[in-house]
Amino acid sequence: MSLIQDKQLAEISINDLLIPSEKVAHVQLNNPLEHALLVLVKSGYSAVPVLDASYKLVGIIGKTVILNQILGLENFEIEKLSSMKVKEVLNRDIPTLTRENSLLDGLNAVIDHPFICLVDKEGYFDGILTRRAILKEIKKNIYVNSYKKH
Ligand code: 4BW
């Protein structure tokens, strides 16, 4: 990277960039797929975090996986939306970060994921770090660095 040094990125904490848990749309493990699809469509997000009953992070769920699950050979099997639960289809294999991680850790993570879930030491959901927040912060740093040069 030419304008922003890795060192600087490693010094910026993601603490200031996260969207706190109370502002993040989420669903729970035991919710029927119908509820999850409703949350996704109403919020406008492609995917949201999945929490257990004690608000620990378990994974994420997105519109595509739900639609794939209810897709039969020739049509959508809508009744599956109420008979199947989030815990049967969510993606548990996701990266996580903590508030103590650096902007560089966040940047590396959002290369392959639109958002990263943050957890505390006990695994309780703490919020998300979005690609948008990372890009905005990096843009700010590019401007600061180019201003310093002139
Ligand atoms: O409702 C929206 N409001 C705003 N301001 N921007 C939105 C909204 N919906 C989508 N966007 C934009 C953002 O720039 O489209 C991008 C892709 O959305 P996505 O992935 O595919 O639904 C958004 O990019 P982003 O802010 O970097 O967010 C990346 C992903 O993080 C989103 C979504 O899956 C998740 N996300 C973001 N804010 C969230 C959230 N999930 C739950 N609750 C939130 N508050």
Image: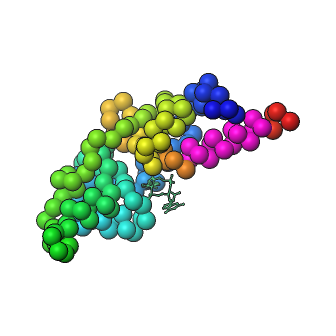
Q: Is residue 73 above or below residue 108?
A: below
User: Which quadrant of the figure contains the N terminus?
Assistant: top right
User: Which quadrant of the figure contains the C terminus?
Assistant: top right
Looking at the picture, how far across and down is residue 44, in whole percent? 43, 65
Residue shown at 69%/38% (left/top)?
A: 141
Looking at the picture, how far across and down is residue 7, in whole percent? 62, 24
Answer whether residue 138 is magenta in the image: yes
**Image quarter of residue 116:** top left
**Image quarter of residue 96:** top left
Residue shown at 35%/50% (left/top)?
A: 49
Looking at the picture, how far across and down is residue 77, in whole percent? 16, 72
Give the magenta range: 133-146
Magenta residues: mostly which secondary structure? helix
Residue shown at 55%/34% (left/top)?
A: 103
Position of 58 with respect to 125 (left or right) is left
Q: Nearer the viewer, residue 28 or 93?
A: 93
